[in-house]
Image (cartoon, helix red, strand yellow):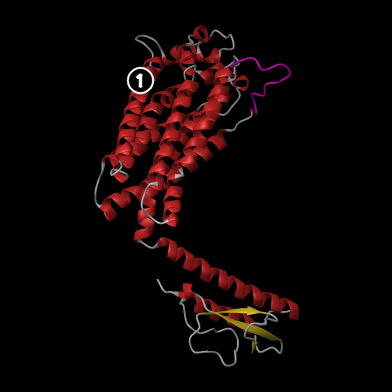
Amino acid sequence: MSDGTDYSALANLPHSVLEKIPGMFPPPGVVANFEHPVDISPWIIGLSSTAIAISTVLFVIRCYNVTIVTRKVRWDDLTCALGYLFILPEYVGIVYSCLDGPLGKHQYEIHVSDVVSPAYLIGSAYMNTVFVSPMLLLVKITFFLMYLEIFSPFRWMRICCVIGGTLCTLFYVSTMIVQFVFATPGPGKSLALHALDGTVIELMLLSVPMAAIGLAFDIYLLILPLIAVAQLNMPLKRKIGTSLLFATGILAIIVSILGVYFRHILDKSTDQIWASAPSQIVTVFEGCFGLICVCMPSLAKVAQRHNLVKKLNILFSRATRLAALDSLLWSSGAERGQRTEDDAIAVSQASESVKFGTTTSTIGDIEDQPEKNPFYSLHIGANESPQTFTAGQQSTHYQACLVEDASATQF
């Protein structure tokens, strides 16, 4: 919604004059602070960078799965790669607008020169408009192609994917053309004048319906695999695990709902630059979280190939036991008012025992110790299989309870 300022005339003024004109009048009762304006650009860059980093890691894992594990490139791998490439311009445009432009600030605390700056017009107004539809199209088409590959025995799934993929392609190709035409200035027309004469504002009126239709596609993409998994002939436990894998699509739905909300706020706001910040963050999130969801099956395959879950469980178990042993000896030293050198040696020996998976405990002198026991859990005053040992050659006695741990298996 325009605030009534004739930006088309302002765009032709010298830059030195534009630097002195406020971007808009502040709301009643608000005093504009041009020296130290409210600026959320660090949050914009931080959130966008985090999403890009996570999606990049998952995309690399998918590439590893394709080239090393399966050694087979499918159509959904190609669309996923292209979708990732279209996410990057969205991210670069936002960062460019934050670092050299006014994105993240209130429009009444900047000048018209900032509104018509190349950093904002190119990085935010243009790139965030023309790249969003192809990005979303490629990410959603990747879902349909992946479902066709995984659930190909189901005839109804093939029909649903073909229909959904066709409608998705028609919709996003149409919006791609409309956005490109509206966002690109005509012959002899500058980008600044084109962005401020109301043409782009008319395009923004379509943002809420477009986001709502995108949300409908996301819900459709979530429901399809859950129905298919329920019909598979596998144990209930595996069905639940597989369903949770595809249920990561809930993240994409949440982001789409936020996209509808923030675009509605932007449509009704007069402070366009400030209101556009959440909308642009959500746009990057839509691409990144969609990419994360389509890469989750590859992550599961790589984890299964390298037995990562079991290894992480073993490491966690060993670290937990070592921390418990160290805490016990520290607390015993505190009760005596000191921690002796022998206690430190005992902890060091316990560390080596846990690290290398030895079968005997090295904590103190345990009487009648069995030959092969992976770990010992020490408890003061324990009642289970009590054995006496002396820690650090002190006279204080503790009770030791032998605990078998199947996780002592070596890598």
Task: Report the side of 395 relative to 77 (left or right).
Answer: right
> Toward which corner of the image does residue 322 lie, by quadrant?
bottom right
| On-image quarter of the C terminus | bottom left
What amino acid type should be assigned to the residue bearing mark 1?
Ser
Q: Is residue 217 above or below residue 180?
A: below
Residue receiving disc 1: 174
| Residue nearer the viewer, 328 or 372 | 372
Q: Nearer the viewer, residue 208 or 288?
A: 208
Is 219 placed left or right of 403 in the picture? left
Q: Where is residue 105 in the image (x, y as percent from the top left)?
A: 59, 27
Residue 99 in view, yes or no: no
Residue 230 in the image: x percent, y percent? 41, 47
Which residue corresponds to the image point at 65% horizontal and 29% vertical from the top-left? Answer: 36
Q: What stretch is highlighted in magenta?
A: 23-37
Q: In which quarter of the image is the N terminus?
A: top right
- At mark 1, the secondary structure is helix
Is residue 379 positioned above or below 289 on the image?
Answer: below
Residue 364 in picture, x, y percent from top left: 60, 86
Magenta: predominant secondary structure element?
A: loop
Which percent across, then down, holds residue 320?
A: 56, 69
Circle 1: is it few (<14), some (14-19), or many (20+) Cα within 10 Å? Answer: few
